[in-house]
Image (cartoon, helix red, strand yellow):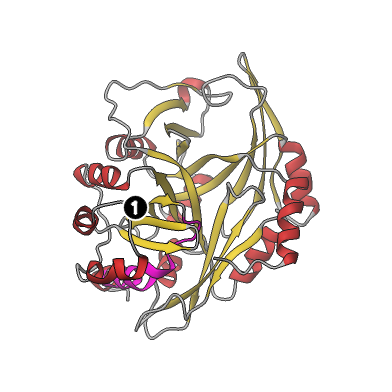
Amino acid sequence: MSNTSPELKKVVAEADDFLPLLGTDHIELYCGNAKQSAYYYMAAWGFQPLAFCGLETGIRDRVSYVLRQDKITLVLTSPLVADGPINDHINRHGDGVKAIALWVDDATKSWKETTSRGAESVLEPTERSDKDGQVVLSGIKTYGDTVHTFVERKNYEGIFMPGYQAWNPVQVSQPLGLQFVDHMVGNVGWGEMDTWTAFYAQVMGFAQLISFDDKDISTEYTALMSKVMSNGNGRIKFPINEPAEGRKKSQIEEYIDFYQGAGVQHIAVATSNIIETVTALRDRGIEFLKVPSSYYDTVLDRVGSIDEDLAPLRELGILIDRDDEGYLLQIFTKPVVDRPTMFFEIIQRKGAKSFGKGNFKALFEAIEREQETRGTL
């Protein structure tokens, strides 16, 4: 599956020494209207309301709604004032991911270790306290305007963190089986992929899990390159994409044009029953990319026997791929924001550790068909 060298294996071992990451704490998105976005993620995606901060909690410049489904926590934030950094971010990028928050045992140590290795600080270690205990936060910059927030919550027993109160609207939809963040993909500009994979290796102790070049990820018209970086325990995986030369404008170029720079392209969320999850999402109005039905005529010749009946996979447009460890099932939404930027992947792993290389051509041809309807191919 990977071409991991002894040197990279050494980096993985060292990651456990200086920057142990316990998992994804939350993902914060800056939104034009956080309240309406919250209802979208609740009604369509099955997220449950958890917490809130804003004027009622003493916050004057912004409002945030916290949603959760199993181990996935979204924080949706909008500004309450006319000017400021949140407004600037939304004006430049549209709705999108601002912070990938990482759960750590020691936010102060995490900040010191990463800044000492060259990371630019955006938040020095800061303690927030209330009657339920304390949370320590710190943060560093990564690609574009995206940041990593380190969250230490071992001494906190509250609902989310200090400054938030419980949020319990009357109407709540049922969860749809989304379990945890499998990986998050970043799009960066021409020639920047190696810069940011080096950042994750040198500053955060990640190792390169696998790489794809334009021979792996290309169609008749477009191409891209990608490297997947993983932390030591494998709980955090960040594929980094950059454009490659092609006859027409690639999806990465389209993203960068409309996002106005590097940023999070998609969030991959895991489920244990992709057929049930995708059926429910589709029934609630979520639109997915579709590959031609002919994809399924030969897919089992390529991937071998699977546990699932092929008919519902074909009907839903779910893709299948296999590696040495097993197989996976995956599907990608159309953009979930107005600009053709951020989308979601739904993935079910049946042993596979890879990222669906065998599906790249069919997937990117489907994306190109969408680009053509937008006039951006």
Q: Which residue bears the numbered disc 1?
A: 337
Image: 199 above or below 295: above
Is 367 included in the stretch rendered in magenta?
A: yes
* In the foreground, 12 or 288: 12
Residue 104 spot, x, y in % from top left:
66, 37
Q: Residues within 10 Å of mark 1 (few under 14, many from 20)?
A: some
Which image quarter is the C terminus in? bottom left
**What residue is shown at x 29% (from left), y 43% (from top)?**
277
Is 209 included in the stretch rendered in magenta?
A: no
Give amino acid for label 1.
Val
Type of secondary structure dominating the magenta stretch: helix
Q: Residue furthest top?
A: 131
What count of labels does the image hold? 1
Say which element carries label 1: loop
**What residue is shown at x 44% (from left), y 61% (from top)?**
259
- Judge from the rendering whether residue 306 lies leftward or rightward of residue 141; answer left or right: left
**What residue is shown at x 42% (from left), y 47% (from top)?**
269
Q: Residue furthest bottom?
A: 247
Which image quarter is the N terminus in? bottom right
Image: 25 above or below 299: above
Residue 328 spot, x, y in % from top left:
40, 56
- Judge from the rendering whether residue 21 lies leftward or rightward of residue 222; answer left or right: right
Residue 120 spot, x, y in % from top left:
71, 53
**What residue is shown at x 47% (from left), y 36% (from top)?**
73
Whether residue 233 is visible to the viewer of this picture, yes or no, is yes
Image: 174 above or below 37: above
Whether residue 92 is visible to the viewer of this picture, yes or no, is no
Q: Residue furthest front?
A: 305
Q: Which residues are magenta?
A: 352-369
Residue 293 spot, x, y in % from top left:
19, 67
- Judge from the rendering whether residue 126 lies leftward or rightward of residue 184; answer left or right: right
* In the foreground, 113 or 29: 113
